[in-house]
């Protein structure tokens, strides 16, 4: 045998050996789901089909954005006096020898009367009066009735300056954060956001968080826009925080992008996710092997849940059933969308190496 044929055989042998260890950018479909077919599988594999979707709907809810929100309610259109508010009284008395005014004085000003923690103010010749929970007009009438017992001709004017318990705080996520005075007891969340200059447009799928005392209520801003019944009435001392949606999913493999993707809306379907990641590689990806990997809590495993905590959902994008079903399959926070690599991609690499080998052989010959 000549030198050239021997050289050719050596090159072919080396090429075939290298083909077995060719580098790849993604796993093959069969490699991922193989462990699900073992005698003691460590994953559960489910195809996303029309027949499977009703079963998935019966499974325990997976982690998602909480929506423990308060429905809207109706309050007084007037302002209500709360502890901490400041009242200014002007008392008019036209009677002779008035106890409240001097000889040449027809009005007495009582300014800076702060409503105490128990909701009362002190008025001379009357004592403590509970005004908390009343409108300014009702409180004025109460003070006047009490003063009339000692000064029948008395008339009272009352001005109110709202204190801490008649304001709400816009903490973050709006264009003008700060403290806002509630003009009435019908002041709502959307009204407060509007007073704060609107929500920051840079936030992705903004989430509204309402802090009331030790309780926290959360919902998506889009839900408030779409449902007026959720535009809840604020209480004095409430705090509103608007933040970008913290949920995300991942993409790897022969995808258009390998990255972490925030949720642009409350629900993201499998088709939405594929669009967000820029589709899959036309030359590398296996359209029959789109996988969504998810991990469930141990409590979800059972007859009405997955067979294992580690679940792989398979999606065939070449079948009409797979395409339609992908529109009804919801991606969950933390999911991994994996575009597996087509076996043909490795074959093309092998043929390329063989072609290069034959070229070298011809040069050597």
Image (tube, rainbow, N blue to C red):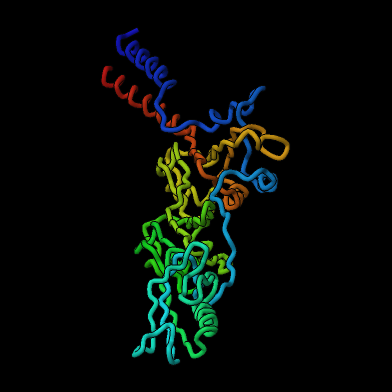
Vertical side of 84 occupied by 298: above or below: above
Measuring from the top left, give residue 163's x and y in whole percent. 42, 67
Measuring from the top left, give residue 206's x and y in whole percent. 45, 57
Question: Is residue 194 visible to the viewer in this orientation of the structure?
Answer: no
Identity of the residue furthest to the front in this view: 97
Vertical side of 70 occupied by 137: above or below: below
Residue positioned 31% across, 24% down in the render: 359
Most foreground residue, 218 or 74: 74
Q: Name the quadrant of the C terminus.
A: top left
Q: Name the quadrant of the N terminus.
A: top left
Question: Is residue 151 visible to the viewer in this orientation of the structure?
Answer: yes
> Would you identify the image quadrant in which residue 179 lies?
bottom left
Most foreground residue, 116 or 266: 116
Tally of marks: 0
Measuring from the top left, give residue 75's x and y in whole percent. 57, 72
Vertical side of 20 occupied by 271: above or below: below
Residue positioned 41% across, 26% down in the render: 350
Residue positioned 50% across, 52% down in the render: 272
Left or right: 25 with respect to 312? left
Most foreground residue, 127 or 131: 127
Residue positioned 45% across, 33% down in the render: 26
């Amino acid at each position: 045998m000549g030198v050239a044929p021997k050289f050719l055989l050596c090159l072919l042998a080396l090429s075939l050996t290298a083909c077995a260890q060719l580098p790849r950018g993604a796993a093959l479909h069969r490699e991922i789901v193989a462990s699900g077919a073992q005698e003691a599988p460590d994953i559960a594999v489910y195809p996303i089909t029309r027949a499977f979707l009703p079963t998935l709907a019966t499974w325990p809810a997976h982690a998602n954005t909480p929506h423990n929100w308060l429905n809207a309610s109706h309050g007084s259109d007037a302002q209500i006096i709360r502890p901490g508010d400041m009242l200014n009284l002007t008392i008019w008395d036209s009677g002779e020898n008035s106890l409240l005014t001097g000889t040449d004085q027809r009005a007495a000003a009582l300014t800076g009367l702060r409503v105490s923690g128990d909701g009362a103010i002190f008025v001379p010749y009357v004592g403590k009066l509970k005004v908390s929970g009343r409108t300014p007009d009702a409180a004025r009438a109460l003070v006047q009735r009490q003063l009339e017992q000692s000064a029948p001709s008395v008339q009272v004017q009352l001005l109110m300056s709202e204190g801490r318990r008649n304001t709400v705080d816009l903490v973050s996520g709006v264009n003008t954060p700060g403290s806002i005075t509630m003009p009435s007891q019908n002041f709502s969340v959307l009204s407060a956001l509007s007073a704060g200059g609107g929500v920051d447009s840079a936030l992705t799928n903004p989430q509204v968080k309402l802090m009331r005392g030790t309780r926290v209520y959360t919902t998506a801003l889009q839900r408030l826009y779409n449902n007026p019944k959720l535009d809840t009435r604020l209480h004095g001392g409430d705090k509103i925080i608007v933040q970008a949606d913290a949920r995300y999913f991942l993409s790897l493999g022969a995808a258009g992008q390998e990255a972490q993707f925030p949720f642009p809306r409350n629900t993201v379907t499998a088709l939405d996710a594929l669009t967000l990641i820029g589709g899959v590689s036309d030359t590398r990806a296996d359209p029959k092997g789109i996988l969504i990997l998810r991990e469930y809590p141990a409590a979800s495993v059972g007859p009405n849940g997955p067979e294992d905590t580690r679940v792989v959902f398979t999606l065939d994008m070449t079948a009409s059933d797979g395409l339609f079903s992908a529109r009804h399959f919801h991606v969950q926070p933390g999911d991994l969308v994996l575009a597996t690599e087509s076996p043909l991609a490795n074959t093309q690499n092998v043929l390329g190496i063989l072609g290069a080998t034959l070229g070298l052989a011809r040069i050597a010959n």
